[in-house]
Amino acid sequence: MKKIFTTLLVLTGIYTASHAQNKGQVAFGASVGVNGSYAISNAKYASGTDTRLDPSFSLQGEYFVDDHWSLKAEAIYNPKGWGNGIYDDGTKQVINVNYNINYITVPVLVTWHIGVEKLWFVNFGPYISFLTSASNDYDHADLKSAYKSTEEGAHLGLGIQFPLSLKNDRTKIFFEYGWEIGASNVLANSADGGATLMRHGLGAGIRF
């Protein structure tokens, strides 16, 4: 019985060690997903907006401070905007217009890996988004000049990851749900009022 108990302890230690992240370890990953975004606004072209859905893509790097905490930075192709907007083309106002505002978003996140096996993780931190293009689906006008070049806010995320095999514990697949809470007015002209962007997204990816 003593030998069985000792063997079980050894095996448990090996399993736990194989799932541990080491201090100083660096991991990289990529993911694809879908965004849902909308605007909170007092601007005439964004009040009463609907959520719009778009694909997103990301690359990420993660540095482990210890077994449970890490710092992660991402570069996300992050389409945002809103639906059911109003557009004034200079001669008339058009309703039910979708606004497409595309960014490259860079969040810097503190990540907590939960439990012994560290399957679950949560992360939080600030982000900055760099505007790449803006348009609508009515006349496809270039609206980039109507928006500020950057947008800032806070990012929150919850995810789960699984090793592909016990022999290759560094390579994992993960699923993550994230929220971005905009904290800055994205409209360039203050006379148009103010608008902040909200985004939530579900993604799946691989890290190694």
Image (spheres, rainbow, N blue to C red):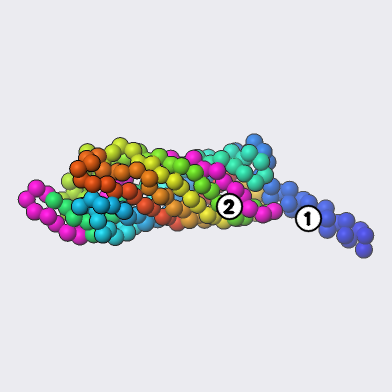
Q: Nearer the viewer, residue 39 or 200?
A: 39
Residue annotated with mark 1: 12
Residue under the point 26% across and 43% down: 187
Question: Can you give x and y, in whole percent of width and height, for residue 114 in the image?
Answer: 63, 53
The tag earlier along the polypeptide, 2 or 1, is 1
Residue annotated with mark 2: 121
Residue under the point 62% across and 44% down: 69
Question: Can you give x and y, in whole percent of width and height, for residue 17 in the image?
Answer: 73, 48
Q: Which quadrant does the C terminus fall into?
A: top right
- Calculate the distance from the C-alpha at mark 2 to the C-alpha at mark 1: 22 Å
Q: Is residue 38 left or right of residue 21?
A: left
Dividing the picture into quadrants, the one containing residue 93 is bottom left
Say if residue 128 shows up in the picture: yes
Residue under the point 48% across and 50% down: 156
Residue under the point 34% across and 38% down: 150
Question: Can you give x and y, in whole percent of width and height, for residue 182 in the image?
Answer: 38, 47
Q: Secondary structure at mark 1?
A: helix
- Amino acid marked by disc 2: Phe
Q: Is residue 85 left or right of residue 205?
A: left
Q: Residues within 10 Å of mark 2 (few under 14, many from 20)?
A: some
Residues drawn in magenta: 89-116
Reply yes or no: does residue 157 show up in magenta.
no
Q: Which quadrant does the N terminus fall into?
A: bottom right
